[in-house]
Image: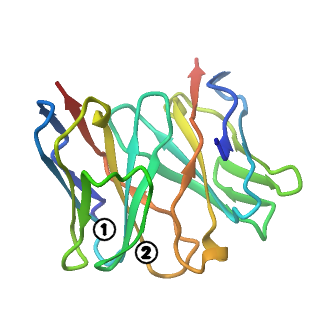
Amino acid sequence: DTGVSQNPRHKITKRGQNVTFRCDPISEHNRLYWYRQTLGQGPEFLTYFQNEAQLEKSRLLSDRFSAERPKGSFSTLEIQRTEQGDSAMYLCASSSPRDNNQPQHFGDGTRLSIL
Amino acid sequence: DQQVKQNSPSLSVQEGRISILNCDYTNSMFDYFLWYKKYPAEGPTFLISISSIKDKNEDGRFTVFLNKSAKHLSLHIVPSQPGDSAVYFCAASEARQTGTASKLTFGTGTRLQVTL
C-alpha cells in the first residue's frame, strides 16, 4: 500500500509566477484534501474532494488558487500570480470511503518558496 | 479563533518515562479526534484517533483520553523512546454531524524531546 505522493517536493519561484502541485492519493481513497502549513502553525484546511467533486473550500483559498481532481484520482493545486505570503508547505491527504471516522493520511508535502 | 489549542509548545521527557501531551478544543460540534506525529521534512503521520462516543482508546504504547465535558484530550506515550522525539499535532473534525468526512482542524503542535 503506497502512501500519498506529492510532487514536486520543493518549488522556488519568483513573485508573480504561476505554480502547480500534484498529489497522488492512496489508491481506492476517494477523499482527497489539501492543507497549507506555515512555520509554527498546524496544517490549515484549504479544500476537499470526494471523487472528482470539490465539496468544500476554505476562505483561505482565494481566487488565485484553484484545485482540480478531473478523474477522481490525482489532484492538482494551482496558484496564480504568486505572492510572498503564499510561501508555505502544501500538504495533501487522502482517506478511505469506508466510513466517516477514517483518518486522513498525509503526503510529505510541497514546500513553496517565493523569492 | 483557535478552535484546537495545544498550550505547551515543547515537552522534555526521559527515556522510559511517560509522556503526556495535552489538547483543548472549543467547538462542541467536534466528534472525532486524532493525533499526528511529524518529523522534519515529512508530512504528519497518523498515530491514534478517538470518537466522541468513547473516552479512551489504546494502541500499543499510545493511549488517547477524551474528556468531553472539559473539552480536553490527552495523548499518553509509555514508555517513551528516543524515536518518539517529534512534533505532535492534535486534530479534530465534525465527522458525524456533517454526515461526510470532514476537514481537520489542527492545534499548533507540541515538540516532544525524549532524552537518554
Circle 2 chain: A
Q: Is residue B70 left or right of residue A60?
A: right
Q: Is the Cβ of the residue at disc 1 closer than 8 Å to that at disc 2?
A: yes
Circle 1 chain: A
Q: Residue furthest top?
A: B116
Q: Which residue is mark 1?
A: A26
Q: Amino acid at mark 1?
A: Ile
Residue A34, compared with residue B114, is above or below; it is below
Residue A49, compared with residue B78, is above or below; it is below
Residue A33, compared with residue B98, is above or below; it is above
**Horizontal and vertical percent position of residue B34:** 60, 55
Q: Which residue is mark 2?
A: A96
The quadrant in which residue B7 appears is top right
Residue name at image x 58 percent, y 24 percent: B114
Residue name at image x 22 percent, y 52 percent: A6
On residue B66, the disc is none
Quarter of the image where the C terminus of chain B is located: top right
Residue A24, compared with residue B72, is above or below; it is below
Q: Amino acid at mark 2?
A: Ser
**Horizontal and vertical percent position of residue B16:** 67, 29
Mark 1 and mark 2: Cα distance apart in space: 9 Å
Q: Residues within 10 Å of mark 2 (few under 14, many from 20)?
A: some
Taking depth in this image into account, of A48 and A24 the one nearest to the observer is A48
Taking depth in this image into account, of A2 and B3 the one nearest to the observer is B3
